[in-house]
Amino acid sequence: MTAQSARPERSGPETASVMDVSPFKPSLIKAVFRDVTPMHVSRSAAGAAASVTRTVLTEIIDGARRAAAAEARKKLIPGDLLSAIDRNVELEVGGKWYDHSPTFQGLTGVLYGAEGVIVPSRKRSRSRKPSAVVGAHRFEAGVKKLLRSQRATAVRAMVRDLDGIASVFLTDLARDAAMIVREGGGKRFGSVTPVMSGEPAPPPFPKDSLPALSARRGDRRTIGRDDILAATTMQLFGGNLRQQALTDATQGWFLTT
């Protein structure tokens, strides 16, 4: 799969409606966190997690829409999801879902992992911890709402893939946030910025755009908004998508349904 150096700017009426409100309710977000940790999740943390998940899915849908448009189709199919990821490796999220989805079975080649190393292509897993996959159906209503807000339609298999990716991504986000709280902070993970050959690298993050991970404030029993932002930097390795998710979560976490 190839990388895309820069994410196209989102524009138009369909984008405005996405940014106005999150399709994922705080009650759903907290339910996912309860599956992972007994820690309390603050309202701002739940809002930030919902915002980050919304941003990630919005970018995936946008990429899939572009792939469908190239074939003069309006309804999204699973192949459009593969095309979107192939065009922009930043959209490679929720990887555990790939082991359970027919869309991703049988792929060959290698992918870049979050640490910048080459990892084998996806193979079917026999994981005994399928909680995120089992709970994926909880995201169907939100996924459909997000599709409508982007004026997109999708076949059932595509909706199921978006369900699964959202569930796995949010579950992983919750686990990382809980780890950050338990350890009183976290180490700054090295980032990998995908760039096409011959193209300039995107600008680095402003120093004040990310929360400090080395020393967090607050008690060890509550996941706060900054813990979600820190977990986001661990889950999203692409510079453009990560920065967009952090910006959306910081500026609009309270705009949840």
Image (tube, grey):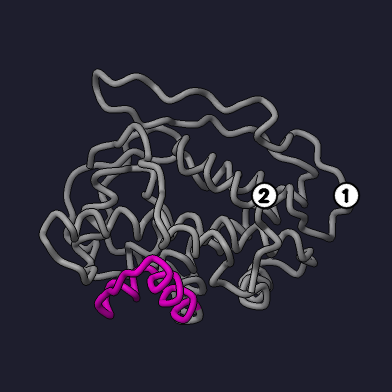
- In the rendered structure, the answer to whether residue 178 lies left or right of residue 140 reads right
* Cβ–Cβ under 8 Å for marks 1 and 2: no
Q: Amino acid at mark 2?
A: Gln
Please name the residue shown 28% across and 72% down the image. Answer: 158
Quadrant where the N terminus lies?
Answer: top left
Up the image or down, 246 lies above or below 23; here it is above
Q: Position of residue 236 (x, y in %)?
A: 50, 45
For residue 8, what is the image quadrant? top left
Up the image or down, 188 lies above or below 14; here it is above
Q: Amino acid at mark 1?
A: Gly
Please name the residue shown 24% across and 18% down the image. Answer: 198
In the image, 190 versus 59, the foreground residue is: 59
- In the rendered structure, the answer to whether residue 82 lies left or right of residue 209 reads left
Q: Is-magenta flag for residue 219? A: no
Tell me the SS state at disc 2.
Answer: helix
Q: Position of residue 97 (x, y in %)?
A: 38, 65
Q: Which mark, by number, is residue 231?
A: none
Quadrant where the C terminus lies?
Answer: bottom right
Magenta segment: 139-162
- In the rendered structure, the answer to whether residue 133 lies left or right of residue 153 reads right
In the picture of the structure, the residue carrying the numbered disc 2 is 251
Q: Is-magenta flag for residue 158? A: yes
**Marks 1/2: CA–CA distance:** 21 Å
Query: Which is closer to the viewer, label 1 or label 2?
Result: 2
N-terminal-most mark, 1 or 2: 1
- In the rendered structure, the answer to whether residue 52 lies left or right of residue 251 reads left
User: Please, which residue is most extreme toward the right here?
Assistant: 219
In the image, 234 versus 8, the foreground residue is: 8
Q: Position of residue 132 (x, y in %)?
A: 50, 71
Tell me the SS state at disc 1.
Answer: loop
Q: Which mark, by number, is residue 218?
A: 1
